[in-house]
Amino acid sequence: MPSDGVLRLVTYNVHRCIGRDGRGSVERIAEVLAELRPDVVALQEVLSSERVPHAGQLERLADAAGLQPVAGGTLVEGDGLYGNGLLLRAPPVEIARHDLSVPGAEPRGALEALVETDGGPARVITTHLGLRARERRRQIEGLEAVLLRRPEPVLALLGDVNEWRRRPFRDPLARISRALRPAPVARTFPSQRPVVGLDRIWVGPGMDLLASGPHRSPLARVASDHLPLLAEVRASAGA
């Protein structure tokens, strides 16, 4: 935990580290993360080296940021696994990978890490939901079950939820927002001129949300097709 108690949380769909210029560059994504100075990073569309001895994108980004990688790939791609990942300040106490796949659609999952905080163990969860509304509804039900599965409090849920329609009276994500506090929806996609807020952050009831918003640096606008979304949080007084 930082000395001032403020945690910088980031969710970032890195698009296989391929930028809007069509060039693949792990180093460029690492530079964006350096601009953000994060304590927790939730990554989507990242390749990890779970199946091979050499470092994948996730491990290289962790090394550049001085963070610990936690892999949660859902698809085999080449010699590695592709999907979710976490970067954390310290190795997690426990890791859980939850299958949110819907038959007939691309495999999806949620990656959960139990981390030590000043207030005790807490959970960080990241996910990348499907492209179809019916698919997402089932995956959101799965996420609800994940939230209820353990007694430890949730520090944050972060990810690319692929929900672009604003339906205030029929918002499928409202089920998550009843359990956790959502950061304001911010436009993160496409990165050059964002028009929709696909990337979201929720924080647990024991956390205060101090600030949030997309990171719009010139480098971030080209490094991926999504902008990273940042939230600053601190444990609530007495939590």
Image (spheres, helix red, strand yellow):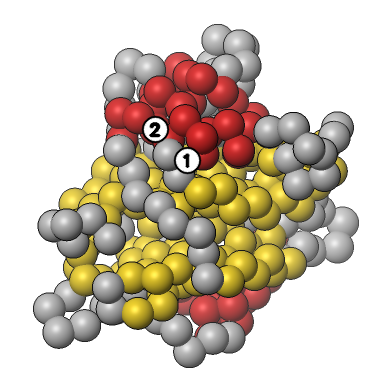
2 above or below 171? above
Q: Residue at x 50, y 59 (%)?
A: 91
| Residue 195 sits in quarter | top left
Query: 148 or 58, which lies in front?
Result: 58
Query: 103 or 100, which lies in front?
Result: 100
| Mark 2 neighbour class, 10 Å CA radius: few under 14, some 14 to 19, many 20 or more | many
Check disc 2 and report its element: helix, strand or loop: helix
Q: Quadrant of the C terminus?
A: bottom left
Check disc 1 and report its element: helix, strand or loop: strand
User: What residue is shown with label 2?
Assistant: 33
User: What residue is shown with label 1?
Assistant: 12
User: x and y percent of residue 167 in the render?
Assistant: 43, 60
Q: Earlier in the sequence, mark 1 or mark 2?
A: 1
Image side of residue 72 versus residue 40, left or right: right
Q: Amino acid at mark 2?
A: Leu
Image side of residue 193 versus residue 131, left or right: left
